[in-house]
Image: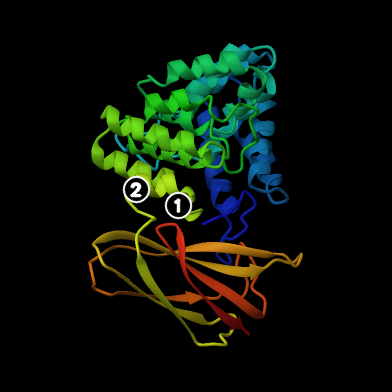
């Protein structure tokens, strides 16, 4: 899978941008726009294909918009009408999840921002409402939030009750504080909480996953507010217990990695219990590129749910130390019964998020958010 818009982190030999934009996918797009009077699909395909190779993924989206725009009316209301007329059928409403749409259908969002943002706000928002039912408009609602915050928020209020779940999801996803690949928004991160209050009880996992991801983003800005809201949702009982439990775990995943007490307490993991923890690392030294064996044993005098993570300290290029958290196990600890857990952790020579260097590294075991055991090992 791709880790970024330019394909960083993809498996060797795989190109996401070429999979998304090629002769076949552009042919599909050309056929859709061919319904418009005067639109020349062969001209579009020839021009668009010629400009793909030198562009990255997001640049290709802008390029497709360039190639389509030249064959559309220059007046934005007429352009919007043409864009809507060329749209394929809405995404299948029965799928309920993981139906993001096709990247080739981002063009209406790009042109809505280009030509509708300043002087045709309402018509442009209408276009986004229609377009997001074919491909998520989460990137393209954000310029409207920055330029017209009050009017756009008012529109999003209405969309929380939309009959199409893709439009409802857009309300949550488009207002996320840390939306991947997307431009920042200047909105107070807590303002969209009213949308999450409305959407947390949505029957569609595609929407509730977005709400949980949004809440996870918010734990970086207002962790107390997130925990308070999750408690409130539980008390309100509008969402099914099973789905809300899943949402809560997903929403607090980053807070849990940081060991935040309120988040762990809400999930049922106590921090003030007496838990004995031993940590063994082998081999020592361990070669970068091979695997480090991590063996942990826990013991307590009472039954306890436990969430066990471990952190690896590593050296940054600037000489400072950094850490990365890894999951080990979630389990139920029985009184006076040792619980053993193991993991073979591969020390990637060229990890995508940090580079390992030879030297002494500290491994810390974290149980229910509390540091319980540490040991050093030499990377060679």
In what element is the residue under mark 2?
Answer: loop
Of 240 and 55, which appears nearest the observer?
240
Asked which quadrant contains residue 141, the reply is top right
Pointer 2: what residue?
Answer: 267
Of 230 and 27, which appears nearest the observer?
230
Q: Residue 97, how many percent across, how many down? A: 36, 40
Residue appearing at x 46%, y 17% in the figure? 157
From this view, report whether residue 146 is shown above or below residue 332: above
From this view, report whether residue 213 is shown above or below residue 239: below
Is 60 positioned to the left or the right of 260 in the image?
Answer: right
In what element is the residue under mark 1?
Answer: helix
Q: Residue 34, how many percent across, how many down? A: 54, 28
On the rendered image, what quadrant is the C terminus found in? bottom right
Residue appearing at x 30%, y 43% in the figure? 245
Q: Please say which color scheme the image uses.
A: rainbow
Q: Is residue 62 visible?
A: yes
Residue 256 bears which disc, if any? 1
Q: Residue 307, how many percent across, how many down? A: 37, 60
Residue appearing at x 42%, y 46% in the figure? 263
Mark 1 nearby-residue class (10 Å; few <14, some 14–19, many ≥20) = many
How far is mark 1 from mark 2, CA to CA?
9 Å
């Amino acid at each position: 899978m791709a880790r970024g818009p330019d394909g960083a982190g993809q498996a060797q030999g795989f190109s996401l941008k070429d999979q998304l934009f090629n002769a076949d996918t552009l042919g599909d797009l050309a056929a859709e726009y061919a319904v418009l009077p005067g639109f020349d699909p062969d001209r579009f395909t020839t021009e668009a294909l010629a400009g793909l190779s030198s562009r990255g993924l997001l640049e290709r989206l802008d390029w497709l918009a360039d190639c389509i725009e030249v064959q559309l009316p220059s007046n934005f209301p007429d352009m919007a009408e043409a864009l809507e007329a060329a749209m394929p059928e809405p995404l299948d409403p029965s799928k309920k999840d993981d139906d993001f749409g096709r990247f080739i259908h981002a063009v209406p969002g790009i042109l809505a921002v280009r030509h509708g943002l300043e002087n045709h706000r309402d018509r442009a928002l209408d276009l986004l409402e229609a377009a997001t039912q074919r491909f998520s408009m989460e990137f393209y609602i954000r310029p409207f939030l920055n330029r017209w915050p009050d009017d756009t928020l008012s529109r999003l209020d209405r969309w929380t009750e939309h009959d199409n779940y893709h439009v409802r999801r857009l309300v949550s996803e488009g207002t996320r504080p840390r939306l991947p690949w997307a431009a920042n928004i200047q909105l107070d991160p807590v303002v969209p909480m009213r949308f999450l209050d409305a959407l947390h009880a949505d029957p569609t996992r595609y929407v509730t996953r977005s709400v949980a991801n949004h809440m996870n983003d918010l734990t970086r800005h207002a962790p107390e507010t997130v925990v308070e809201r999750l408690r409130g949702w539980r008390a309100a009982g509008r969402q099914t217990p099973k789905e809300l439990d899943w949402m809560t775990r997903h929403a607090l995943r980053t807070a849990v990695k940081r060991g935040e007490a309120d988040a762990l307490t809400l999930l049922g993991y106590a921090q003030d219990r007496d838990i004995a923890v031993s940590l063994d690392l082998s081999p020592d030294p361990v070669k970068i590129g091979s695997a480090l064996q991590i063996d942990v044993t826990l013991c307590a005098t009472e039954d306890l749910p436990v969430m066990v993570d471990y952190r690896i300290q590593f050296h940054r290029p600037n000489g400072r130390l950094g850490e990365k958290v890894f999951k080990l196990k979630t389990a139920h600890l029985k009184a006076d019964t040792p619980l053993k857990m193991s993991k073979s952790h591969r020390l990637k020579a060229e990890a995508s998020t940090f580079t390992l260097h030879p030297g002494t590294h500290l491994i810390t075991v974290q149980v229910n958010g509390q540091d319980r055991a540490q040991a050093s090992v030499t990377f060679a």
